[in-house]
Image (cartoon, grey):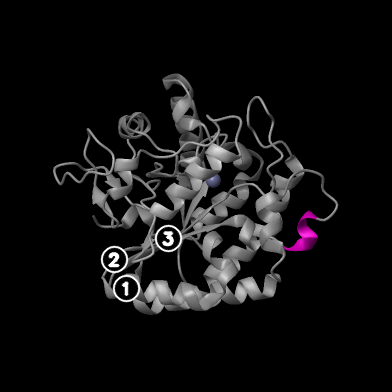
Amino acid sequence: MPQASINIDLDTLSEDIDKTTRVIRSDELRAITYCRVVPRFLELLERHSVKATFFVIGRDALDHGNVLTRIARAGHELANHTMTHPKQLVHLDDAAIEREIRECGDLLERLAGRPTAGFRAPGYTISQRVVAMLRREGYRYDSSLNTSLCYYAVKKVFKAVRLRDQDYLSTQRFTEIFGPRSPYRLSAERLGVRDDSQEFVEIPISIIPFISYPFVTSLLLHFGAAPSLKALRLLVARDTFVNCELHINEFTDRGDINGYDGSFYLTSQYVRIDLARRLSYFDRLIAAIKASCDVVLMRDVIA
Ligand SMILES: [Zn+2]
């Protein structure tokens, strides 16, 4: 039975982002995320008696530490998703990257009562420099490498065609997308390269065999449950680790964001699908993962 991890990025519901700092602005939306939307995900986990890893944005969590403490006490894992979710993380200078990692990590350590072990970069923008800093800060794993050729191509095209601010959306290096697709001990010199003498682990995003499409629910939800369950069977048949990545805005109801200003580009894609249908999708997916995999927290993944 392969190992699997159910993990969620607690990104904020709106992309109402300050142009200079790129910080998401609305306190109210953070409150909705933590008080209304996160409990839906927790109920799902409880229904299936599974534990999950939560990638938390430090600044969004500042006012909602009590929710996160309860999550950690229930046996889930809190992991670092940076302090302010800068999509241009890899372009920041060393001191700024260190602040992004350390401030969030310290906050989560206080809330969970244990050192923060894991990290995921916003938008999967990781670099050798960021990983070196994670090692220095005592982290045990990163889960940011996305080895999907489809995802890489789409991001490159989007960047070329749509974006004036080229630094905003970073893509990984082409060679890195040929890295291993199951957790591995990561070389100290190069991303995407295994080195069993190292302790630090990379837990890459799962990729569906044959089509090289990421096994990320936000990219699969729209097709209904059948393709996701088929993809899961393909991964399990190859005894491949299943990194089941979700995003909190997949649990938003239309009523949660009605009446708020701001750009809800991603969230509005999900609320078009009835919440009950989405919850039924997740029920089927998690039941299938539980039946065919050994579900562990990211910090307990064996590489
Ligand atoms: Zn994120």
In the foreground, 302 or 93: 93
**On-image quarter of the C terminus:** bottom left
Residue 93 at x, y percent in the picture: 45, 20
> What residue is at 31 percent from the left and 63 percent from the top?
241
Name the residue carrying label 1. 236
Asked if disc 2 and disc 1 are in contact, CB closer than 8 Å, the reply is yes
The answer to which image quadrant residue 138 occupies is top left
Q: What residue type is labelled 1?
A: Val
Q: Between tags 1 and 3, which lies in front?
A: 3
Q: Extreme right residue here?
A: 259
In the image, is the residue at mark 3 within 8 Å of ligand 1 by its beta carbon?
no
**On-image quarter of the N terminus:** bottom left
Residue 240's disc number: 2
Q: Determine whether 49 is above or below 58 in the image.
A: below
Q: How crowded is mark 3: few (under 14 residues within 10 Å), some or many (20 or more)?
A: many
Magenta-highlighted residues = 253-257
Residue 54 at x, y percent in the picture: 50, 53
Q: What residue type is labelled 3?
A: Tyr
Q: In this view, does 181 lie to the left or right of 72?
A: left
Q: What residue type is labelled 2?
A: Thr
> What residue is at 80 percent from the left and 61 percent from the top?
255
Name the residue carrying label 3. 213
Residue 130 at x, y percent in the picture: 38, 32
Q: Quick check: is 69 in the magenta stretch?
A: no
> What residue is at 45 percent from the left and 44 percent from the top?
124
Helix or strand or loop: what does disc 1 sit on? Answer: helix
